Image (cartoon, rainbow, N blue to C red):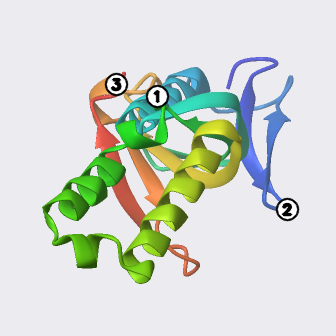
Amino acid sequence: MRLGAKLPAIVGGLAVLLSFGAGTAAATPTPSLSDLQSAATTFLASEVAARHWTIDTQSLTQLSSMIEGDTIKVQYLVTQKHLLDYGAVNDVPVMKGLLGEQAQMTPAVASSAALVGYINEWQSNLASYISTPQLSHEELQVTASLDSNGDVEPSTVQVFELADENGDWVSAATDLI
C-alpha cells in the first residue's frame, strides 16, 4: 500500500476512510468513489426525468462502502424535495385520462357525486404535487468491478434500489458512466 493511502471502510454503518502510513506491507490500490457517485447522480437524473419531477433540493450521502475481492459496493441515501413538473393539473396524463373518460359518459354518470368527488380529489392532490415540494428518501447501492490497478471498470457499474424493508436490492440501471 502507498504511504498515506486511504481505503473506505464500514464502521458502525457509517462510511469512514482508514489511513495507512509507513510500515504497511502490501500495495492495495484505492478505487475512485467519484465514478460510483457519478453513476448514482446519472441514475437520479434519469429517474427525475422519467417521473416528470423538478428537483427543489437534492443531497446524496454516502452511508457505507466496502471492497470484497475485486468488487466495490457503495450505499447512498438520497434525500430530495421535488415538484411534479407540469404547468397545470389538466396537463398531467392521468388527469387528461380521467377527464376524457368523463366526457364520454352519459351526463347522469358524468355528473354523479361519486365521480365528481373522485376527480376533485385527484385534482386537489395533483395541484399540491405541482405547487408544494414533496420530501422523499431513497437508498441506492452502486457496485462495480475493480481492475488489477484497483480502478473502477466503467462497463461494470450497476445501480440498485432498495426494494423493501427486508434489504432486498433490485437493479435500477446500467451503462451510467
What residue would you read off at disc 3?
Answer: 154
**Can residue 7 be seen by looking at this rendering?**
yes
Q: Residues within 10 Å of mark 3 (few under 14, many from 20)?
A: some
Q: Is residue 121 left or right of residue 90?
A: right
First of labels 2, 1 by sequence position: 2
The spot of residue 91 in percent (x, y) is: 37, 36
The N terminus is located in which quarter?
top right
Q: Which mark is residue 37?
A: none
- Amino acid on which disc 2 is placed: Gly
Between 101 and 162, the one nearer to me in the picture: 101
Name, please, the residue furthest toward the top.
3
What residue would you read off at disc 2?
Answer: 12
Residue 12 sits in which quadrant? bottom right
The spot of residue 89 in percent (x, y) is: 47, 42
Between 51 and 125, the one nearer to me in the picture: 125
The spot of residue 62 in percent (x, y) is: 71, 41
Which is closer to the viewer, label 2 or label 1?
Answer: 1
First of labels 2, 3 by sequence position: 2
| Alpha-carbon span between mark 2 and mark 3 | 29 Å
